Image (spheres, helix red, strand yellow):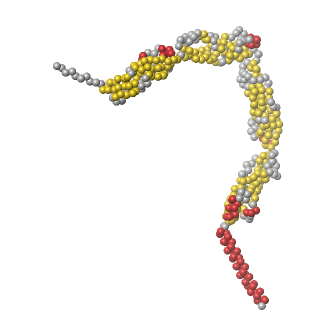
Amino acid sequence: MTAGRSRGLLRNLGTLLLAFVLAVVVWVSAVTSADPNQEQTFVVPVEIIGEKEDLEILTPLPDTLEVTLLAPRSILEQIQEDAGALSAWMDFSHTGAGRYVVAVQYHIAEQYRPVRVVKVNPQNVEVTLEALVSRMLPIETRVTGEPALGYQAAPPEWSLQQVTVSGRVSQVEKVDKVVAELNIEGANETIERSVRLVPLDANGNRVDEVTLEPDEVNVVQTITLRGGYRNMVVKVVTTGQVAEGYRQTSISVSPPNVMVFSADPQIVNQLPGYVETQPLDLSGAVDDIETILSLNLPEGVSVIGDPNVLVQVGIAAMEGNAKVIRVVEVIGLLPEMEAQVAPDAVDVILFGPLPVLDSLADTDVRVLVDLSELEPGVHQLSPQVIVLPEGIRVEAIVPESIEVNIQPVSTPTPTATP
């Protein structure tokens, strides 16, 4: 009896196992159809850790890591919403100067495992690191150019003699000298300024990829007059008066200063601070004057350079107002029409040079009223003033408008003959 029951159980065991497997398959199929597996690529920021202050990474590093995962859709949605689900980093803690292949490492939070990692990009990055160094170098100072004629330059005073050059070792080793250059070309007074330092290689080319501390140096360059020299103002001497009704508007001299010299410095030092020109006669002038004048120098004193100067004098007519009375002239009236103007004369207020205003002829100022295309009737019109001389402008017309009555020409009534 017992043996028979055991054989029955053995016969049914295969059926039971098959039923269990089928049930699991059905369950997995049901779950998979409800929450199917999918692939999705996530972009993860890459953190750089372990950087050292005495090393510079020369290779561009990836900002992000692309991780493609295979997982149920619900898990992928959770990872998408969770900022801490995925992390990535590159570790430089164990690197020195040289070339390395550094892995881009990543981590998936425990609660989202197991998920299948399909692809990671990039997996590794080949990087080059170079040592950062500093060295002290003397500052090579240079003064170029020459001061203005009659001046001399003392040795310049620089605020620093050394500078620290920092950067990658390959660049710092290129620096042969650090130069500070001051240009004093044409200077006629003491110079105080900051000068930028320039790192140069052995061939005189600038080395850009280094840092200088400080990057500027202050300099004082004293500029003084040589003995026997003096910079003096030019004073223009004029005589006579411009024509009546005109005035002098300006006077200029070029150059405004000249350098004078005497073998006896005492003579120069006793000069009043200016040197006069030969007199310029303005008598009766009515136009601008431009002329060359020589300088009136004391004996034993000479001018360095051209002994003549260019003098320009502005002359302009004095301006004012004038009133003229003019009869209103009618133009554009059809032959079969006639016009009556009231008033028939107007006052014209003019402004301009007085000599021109005083010499105006009657024909120089006309007052016109244009009746072209006007219908018969009474019209209020603004007259037009025509002024022939240039430089005269109309300030006002009194009155500003006039009345014009346009009517057909009247035909005389025939007289009956007895």
Q: How many labels does the image show?
A: 0
Q: Where is residue 249 in the image (x, y as percent from the top left)?
A: 58, 17
The answer to whether residue 13 is above or below residue 82 is below
Q: Which of 193 and 198 is in front in this view?
A: 193
Residue 263 makes an appearance in the image: no
Among all residues in the image, which is located at the extreme top?
299
Answer with the quarter of the image where residue 325 lies. Answer: top left
Q: Which of 170 and 248 is in front in this view?
A: 248
Quadrant of the frame with the N terminus: bottom right
Residue 377 makes an appearance in the image: yes
The answer to whether residue 154 is above or below residue 136 is above
Answer with the quarter of the image where residue 174 lies. Answer: top right
The answer to whether residue 320 is above or below residue 378 is above
The answer to whether residue 363 is above or below residue 117 is above
Q: Position of residue 129 (x, y in %)?
A: 78, 48
Query: Which residue is depicted at the point 47% across and 22% down?
Result: 396
Query: Which residue is depicted at the point 76% across and 33% down?
Result: 216
Query: Which residue is depicted at the point 79% across and 53% down?
Result: 91
Answer with the quarter of the image where residue 285 lies. Answer: top right
